[in-house]
Image (cartoon, grey):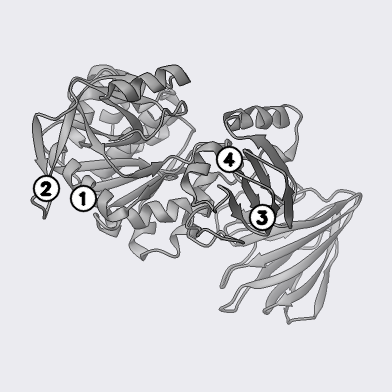
Amino acid sequence: MKAVILAGGSGTRLWPLSRKNYPKQFLKINNCEVGEGCAFDKGSLIQQTVSRLLMTVEPEDVLIMTNDEYKFHVKSDLDALPEEVSGNIVLEPFKRNTAPAIALALRYCVDKLACSEDEVVFVCPADHIIEPESKFSQYLKAAEDAAEKGVIVTFGIKPLYPETGYGYIKTKSKTGDSQFTIHGSRASVPCLEVERFVEKPDAKTAEKYLKDGGYYWNSGMFAFTIGTLVKELKRHAPEIAALYDAGYDHMFSSFGQMPDISIDYAVMERAGTVVTLPMDIQWNDVGSWDSMFEVFPKDAAGNIKIGDVISHDTTNTLVISDKRLIATVGLDNLLVVETDDAILIARRGDAQKVKNVVETLTAAGRKEASEHTTTYRPWGSYTILEDGPRYKIKRIVVNKNEQLSLQMHHHRSEHWVVIKGTARVTIGEDLKFVHENESVYIPKSTLHRLENPGKLPLEIIEVQNGEYVEEDDIVRVDDVYGRGK
């Protein structure tokens, strides 16, 4: 079985932590214990997703679909996982929806990994929280059994409350007629025939779904054989199927011609061979701060406090401090999320409206809509500490054995002070080593390069000075990461 992880989304409903340039699949936002000062101490959501799948599939059978904008984020997160995983990263050349992405993944499996049409493929997003993972692994093995019989398996979640932020799956019966045995167990899991898919309901309708029964949250996870899904694509999405038939290379180069359509609309809602595997587990798509509130354990007052937080007379409130101390007094039923350049304060229940804030920021051209003060690059990261007229101060971290491009700037000079580690610095024709508490000066229009030859991260403070200090004043002459000049 191959596992395809969809990691190209740029969701903004978890703003200000999640932003376009650093979406939620790369956030480290769960594994907290009840108590003061809970920290972001677990791997990112995409790391958790890969680790969870490795309980069922081999590392070389994990395929990650993303895009050029996030490829270095993905590679960086995969460095902490088995080496074989990083080999199967497929970059979507254009941003499309899930149907084209999944079709491209299947073609990659056939042409590059020599998979047959009988190969079972499991597809899931990169940013869900699932517990317990051992139980999910059993469900996944049961879905593999079912998919081998020629059906498309959707993963339905037993609803715990009338959620209006999820789509639902309506089954034809409340108990399954066919049983697909879980590997290595005497237990069995019923697969239920799907009657229809239901869009996100209003509160009254969601309450009715729970009362009636036979409705499950649509988790956005699927299992099928390659042959089964391709047959459904040819029947219901002929434009995608035609490009699929032309082979991976042609499909990749013609990806811009793909329709922008989800796999639900393209196939699932119209296919006649769809069943649901009901799962009774803890699942959350982390689609909003309201849904995040359901994930974390709460203290005796019903609060979730992450980071440096002090609260008095505060109840049923989520408070996340990323950089600074947050003190709350007399709050109830609120969401408070702090980063070093933005603070969100909202009522619980209104978190879906956060996307409206991002739309407003985007329309105003505000960088807070898409960028953090910390920006990640393939070689490490930089954080803007101060930004003023004619100057900018950054903290730059270069990972071990990494290097920046050989570059120059027309409008600014730079001073570098090494805080930690040893830097190898090229300035024009000169090469020198700069140690802790030493500095170096780079004049305007001078070719230069910063490298970390050591085994520990290199940290420097950079002071830029000039008439223009924005990031587009970079002329790259040589770059090991293949970025353009």
Query: Disc 1, disc 4: CB below 8 Å?
Result: no
Query: On residue 14, which mark appears?
Result: 4
Based on the displayed image, in which of its 4 quarters is residue 226 positioned? top left
Q: Amino acid at mark 2?
A: Ala
Q: Is residue 386 visible?
A: yes
Q: Is residue 91 left or right of residue 209?
A: right
374 vs 203, nearest the viewer? 203
Query: On residue 322, which mark appears?
Result: 3
Q: Is residue 288 left or right of residue 111?
A: right
Mark 3 against mark 2, which lies toward the viewer? 2
Which residue is disc 1 drawn over? 138
Q: Position of residue 240 (x, y in %)?
A: 33, 24
Which residue is disc 2 drawn over? 187
CA gap, disc 2 and disc 1: 10 Å
Q: Amino acid at mark 1?
A: Gln
Residue pictured at 60% horizontal, 35% vertical:
348
Mark 2 vs 1, N-terminal side: 1
